[in-house]
Image (spheres, helix red, strand yellow):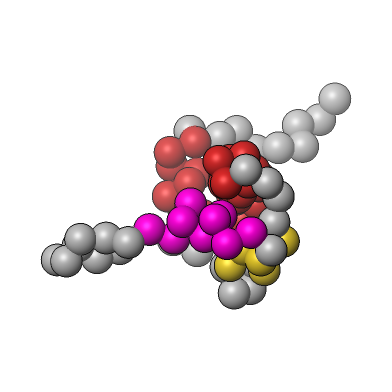
């Protein structure tokens, strides 16, 4: 069969090119791995807080479980910025 996917220069180069606004990486982090990682991390926050919660992805805030907030947003010592 004819090749349908161009040969990869390597995932590091693909990621760098995509991050700089070039062609999308084969393992797309915008539509696939980003939301997947977010879901896994939110599941971890739900487990650690002892229950589920509603998630407002636009405001980046949990609802219905106040304890979950401490696993979503951290307080940093003075002098540190993220």
Residue at the extreme right: 1
Q: Position of residue 55 (x, y in %)?
A: 68, 62
Q: Which segment did they paint magenta? A: 65-74
Task: State whether residue 71 appears in this view.
Answer: yes
Please give the name of the residue rendered at 43% of the width and 38% of the height, measured from the top-left corner.
12
Please give the name of the residue rendered at 52% of the width and 60% of the height, measured from the top-left corner.
69
Is 1 left, or right, of 59 in this rendering?
right
Q: Position of residue 77 (x, y in %)?
A: 20, 61
**Residue in the foreground of this view, choosing between 34 and 10:** 34
Q: Position of residue 58 (x, y in %)?
A: 63, 73
- Image position of 60 with respect to 65: above or below: below
- Image position of 47 with respect to 60: above or below: above
What is the total number of numbered labels drawn onto the structure image?
0
**Residue in the foreground of this view, choosing between 27 and 81:** 81
Q: Position of residue 5 (x, y in %)?
A: 71, 37
Please give the name of the residue rendered at 55% of the width and 41% of the height, measured from the top-left corner.
48
Is 22 left, or right, of 3 in this rendering?
left
Residue 22 sits inside the magenta stretch = no
Residue at the extreme left: 79
Quadrant of residue 43 within the rendered picture = top right
- Image position of 73 with respect to 33: above or below: below
Residue at the extreme top: 1
Q: Quadrant of the N terminus?
A: top right
Task: State whether residue 31 appears in this view.
Answer: no
Please give the name of the residue rendered at 32% of the width and 61% of the height, measured from the top-left corner.
75
Q: Quadrant of the C terminus?
A: bottom left
Quadrant of residue 56 within the rendered picture = bottom right
Q: Main secondary structure of the magenta part?
A: helix
């Amino acid at each position: 069969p004819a090749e349908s996917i161009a040969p990869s220069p390597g995932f590091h180069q693909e990621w760098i090119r995509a991050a700089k606004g070039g062609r999308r990486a084969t393992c797309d982090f915008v539509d696939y791995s980003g939301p997947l990682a977010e879901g896994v991390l939110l599941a971890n926050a739900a487990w650690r807080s002892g229950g589920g919660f509603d998630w407002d992805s636009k405001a980046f805030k949990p609802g219905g479980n106040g304890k979950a907030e401490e696993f979503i947003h951290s307080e940093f010592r003075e002098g540190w910025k993220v």
